[in-house]
Image (cartoon, grey):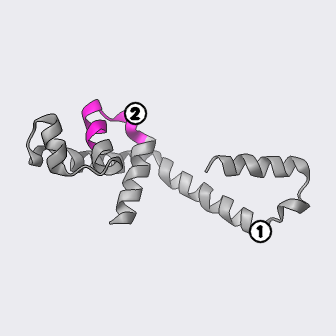
């Protein structure tokens, strides 16, 4: 469950600008703020089922965006390459320019 939540959070980070304000609100409250479906339904004065359906549809939309745009997949690959590079490189032996680049890459995490 934690892995799924983490994935949805990343997808939300990448694609939230493609969602409606209502979808963003529900997703933020459910996945980021850890609200229950009941708490969200009370906040927006809708049924618990309506909130559940909206969140599931939005998750499916995020997965469809990912299939087409691959932002999360590319991000994950970059993160893995960066970790491998850090493991192989002794920073003290790098020229200053390379040390700066590595520091910039680390800041992107």
Q: Which is more toward the observer, 45 or 87?
A: 45
Residue at 14% of width from left, 49% of height from top? 38
The answer to whether 12 appears left or right of 51 in the picture is right
For marks 1 and 2, the one nearer the N-term is: 2
The quarter of the picture where residue 81 lies is bottom right
The quarter of the picture where residue 22 lies is top left
The answer to whether 97 appears left or right of 79 in the picture is right
The residue tagged with tag 1: helix, strand or loop?
helix
Give how far across and how far down residue 13 sits, in percent.
44, 43
Q: Are marks 1 and 2 in contact (CB under 8 Å)?
A: no
Total marks in image? 2
**Which secondary structure dominates the residues rendered in magenta?**
helix
Give how far across and how far down residue 109 sits, in percent.
61, 51
The N terminus sits in image quarter: bottom left
Q: Which residue, given by chain and number where applicable, does mark 2 sit on? A: 17
The answer to whether 96 appears left or right of 76 in the picture is right
Q: Which is more toward the observer, 90 or 29?
A: 29
**Which numbered dot is residue 88?**
1
Q: Which residues are magenta?
A: 15-26
Q: Is 96 rendered above or below residue 88?
A: above
Q: Confirm whether the magenta stretch covers residue 25.
A: yes
């Amino acid at each position: 469950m934690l892995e799924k939540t983490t994935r949805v959070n990343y997808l939300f980070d990448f694609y939230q600008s493609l969602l409606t304000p209502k979808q963003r609100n529900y997703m933020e409250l459910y996945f980021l703020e850890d609200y229950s479906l009941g708490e969200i339904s009370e906040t927006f004065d809708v049924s618990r089922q309506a909130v559940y359906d909206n969140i599931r549809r939005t998750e499916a939309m995020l997965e469809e965006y990912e299939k087409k745009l691959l932002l999360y997949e590319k991000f994950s690959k970059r993160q893995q390459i960066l970790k491998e590079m850090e493991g192989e490189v002794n920073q003290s032996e790098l020229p200053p320019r390379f040390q700066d680049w590595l520091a910039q890459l680390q800041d992107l995490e």
